[in-house]
């Protein structure tokens, strides 16, 4: 079954978890919602680095991860191997970059390109939709392989990232993030 992830809300995941916890028989939709919950927890546990824990940022990131289409989430986690970083000391810029990370001696690949989205403290001041829109926009740059450090983003790259994030269902939040 296909789930319209752009319309899923946090409450939907919580309700599926409650049904699961109560031992109720789960629908296919519930199973998918629980699978998404696992993917989000996996992502946050292994692909996020932050020196300060900001519940507001984590909420926004969780919401983006919850609402992304299946294939996009898969691509971000597996192909792009994107990591989200939220440094304690930052400038006012949020950006995406890629780099080749040397072999860790464990991975199958000798070297592997990873992507990073670097967030900034100003997002914690709210509002929530601005943080959601900003994170979705940066993840769109990652999918489009538009790294900030190799070249500053052109206006057309900015528009492409906004358009892609809007296709994913973040149109309102993208508008909010441009204010
Ligand atoms: Zn951008």
Image (spheres, rainbow, N blue to C red):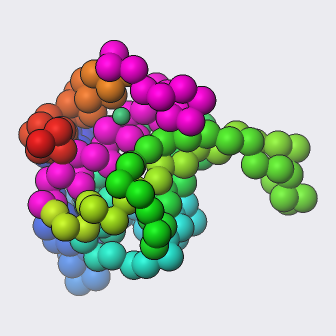
Residue closer to the observer: 30 or 24: 30
Query: Is 160 displayed left or right of 8 in the figure?
Result: right
What range of the chain is rendered magenta? 127-156
Considering every residue shown, the one lying at the far bottom of the view is: 22
Residue closer to the observer: 38 or 165: 165
Tell me if I can see residue 154 in this picture. Answer: yes
Res 18 quadrant in image: bottom left
Image-quarter location of ligand 1: top left
x and y percentages locating residue 36 in the rendered image: 36, 56
Res 22 quadrant in image: bottom left
Query: Is 85 displayed left or right of 164 in the figure?
Result: right
Tell me if I can see residue 25 in this picture. Answer: no
Quarter containing the C terminus: top left
Res 167 quadrant in image: top left
The residue sitting at 47% across, 28% down in the picture is 152
Quarter containing the N terminus: top left
x and y percentages locating residue 103 in the rendered image: 86, 51
Residue closer to the observer: 8 or 61: 61
Query: Is 132 displayed left or right of 52 in the figure?
Result: left
Residue 131: say if magenta: yes
Q: Main secondary structure of the magenta part?
A: helix
x and y percentages locating residue 91 in the rendered image: 41, 57
The residue sitting at 29% across, 51% down in the picture is 64
């Amino acid at each position: 079954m296909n789930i319209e992830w752009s319309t899923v809300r946090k409450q939907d995941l919580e309700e599926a978890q409650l049904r699961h916890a109560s031992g109720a028989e789960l629908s296919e939709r519930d199973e998918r919602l629980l699978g998404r919950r696992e993917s989000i927890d996996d992502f946050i546990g292994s692909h996020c680095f932050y020196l300060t824990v900001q519940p507001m940022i984590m909420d926004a990131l969780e919401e983006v991860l919850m609402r992304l289409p299946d294939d996009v989430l898969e691509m971000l986690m597996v192909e792009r191997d994107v990591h989200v970083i939220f440094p304690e000391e930052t400038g006012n810029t949020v950006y995406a970059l890629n780099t080749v990370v040397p072999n860790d001696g464990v991975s199958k690949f000798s070297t592997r390109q990873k992507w990073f989205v670097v967030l900034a403290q100003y997002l914690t001041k709210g509002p929530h939709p601005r943080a959601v829109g900003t994170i979705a926009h940066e993840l769109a740059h990652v999918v489009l392989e538009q790294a900030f450090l190799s070249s500053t983003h052109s206006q057309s790259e900015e528009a492409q990232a906004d358009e892609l994030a809007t296709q994913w269902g973040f149109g309102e939040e993208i508008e909010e993030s441009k204010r």
